[in-house]
Amino acid sequence: MLKQLEGATEVSGVPEAFVPIIKSEISGVALDFLMARLALSSVPDDLSLKDDNLLRNLDEKCVRSLNGSRVIDEILRLVPNVEVFRDALRCIKLWAQRRAISSNVNGFLGGVAWALLVARICQLYPNAIAGAIVSRFFIIMYKWQIYPQDRAHRMPIITPAYPAMCATHNVTKSTQMIITEEFKRGSEIVERVISGNASWSELFAKHDFFHKYRYYLQIIATTANPDLQLKWSGTVESRVRQLVMKLEYVDTLILAHPFVKGFDQVCYCLTEEEVRQVAQGEISSTILKRKKEDIENKEGAGPIYSTTFYIGLAIDKPVGNNGPRKLDISFPTTEFTKLVKSWDKYDEATMGLVVRHIKKSALPDNVFEPGERPAKMAQKRPKGSGKSGNNASDMPNKRQRSSQSVADLNQLLEDRSISATPTLPPANNIKSPQLPFGENAAIATGAVAAQ
């Protein structure tokens, strides 16, 4: 039914999710539909989900699906002024989207969690207007004393409807640090706005994720079919949070920052070698410029659909001068690959998965808006070096300092570098396990050099 709806461009079910949904895009707007089966012979048009008796004889997934609507109804009943609540919530959700911290599946806060936080501020200030609610939101949230119940609930926000659930179950150590840092930034801007030294537009400045770190993990999911790609990329995305949690156990890694969405791309390939290059993220300008009509009626040619996810890596500052240190991420990436490929519908012949790390300078153009990508700086050649080589431009400049650091945490990155390029580093700097899943999985690891 949804696929036949006018304006529907993407429709795919995710039945294995914690809360089963149908992901769709209709008229350019992304929508997620919840599903539930009620123990009723017929469903009246004026059915209200507030009655707890409707939950009788339902399985857990159906109860969780119904809980979304029931929570929203309860929130609207509890807030003192619905219009003020809605205006303030729109503002906070816009801020969260601009700062790239609105994604429940990736370990940040989802729509329900943001609604609960805004509703609580509305209760504390029942007579305040929306602007006052927004300003107090950041001041209070930054000073919020969090008392985690266990490792699985780092920022507990409990839903008000029965059965009560934690709306922030997916929050990890890394995403909690990022959210707290954004609360701090918002609080500082709001205080300057109140004193007349800043404007509200500063609050909604776009995130700097692709300028913030020196090194990133790139997770590339590929297929040759658009419908299959929706399911495969959705499955990979739902497991990225597990990779973040495993990376948090790596000694020299203090933060694994997942980006909130993937980047879709269609490449038209003529040969198997071009297919391999696209699957590994090494797309040439020739492939990027090629159009659909360029491969028509050519034997062996076809489209390759890819979705790429990114994780920013914040590396610990070295203590003393102990020489080069290794950043071994082979175990978490291997475990992640096994987890994704344990999907019961996984087919190695039609689905590709590559996990590799890249430098900031090697990020593709499609992650930046037009004119956003910084110009590449020419690196100085050391004195007395008359040699030149093809890899000179790939060598990290140890004296270069990042001018894009905003968070205090990221200052720890300044004197670190990973001796890695889009190709694999030397064998003595690599710990790459043997994968039993075929050749369509590549895991790149490298050594960390302490400056």
Image: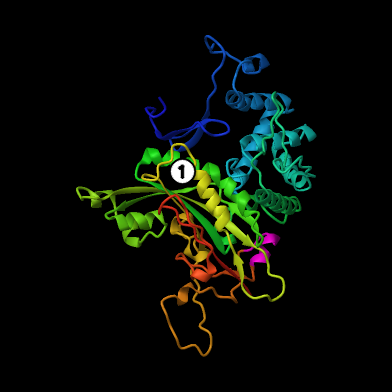
Residue placed farthest to the top in the image?
Answer: 41
Residue 134 image-quadrant placement: top right
Q: Could you tell me residue 61's position as x and y percent? A: 58, 26
**Would residue 403 be visible to someone looking at this image?**
no
Q: Could you tell me residue 446's position as x and y percent? A: 54, 66
For label 1, the residue is 233
Q: Magenta part mainly helix, strand or loop? A: helix
Q: Could you tell me residue 151's position as x and y percent? A: 72, 44
**Compared with residue 269, is residue 151 higher up or lower down, i.e. above or below?**
above
Q: Amino acid at mark 1?
A: Ser
Magenta residues (range): 405-413
Locate the N terminus and report the quarter of the image it occupies: top left
Residue placed farthest to the bottom in the image?
Answer: 384
Point 52% across, 70% down: residue:
428
Residue 192 image-quadrant placement: bottom right
150 relative to 10 in the view: left or right: right
Point 61% across, 51% down: residue:
246
The answer to which of 103 and 132 lies nearer the viewer is: 103
**Compared with residue 82, is residue 384 higher up or lower down, i.e. above or below?**
below
Residue 37 magenta-highlighted: no
Locate the C terminus and report the quarter of the image it occupies: bottom right
Q: Could you tell me residue 132's position as x and y percent? A: 74, 41
216 relative to 440 in the view: left or right: right
**Would residue 227 be visible to someone looking at this image?**
yes
Residue placed farthest to the left in the image?
Answer: 297
Q: Label 1: few (<14), some or many (≥20) within 10 Å? A: many
The answer to which of 115 and 345 lies nearer the viewer is: 345
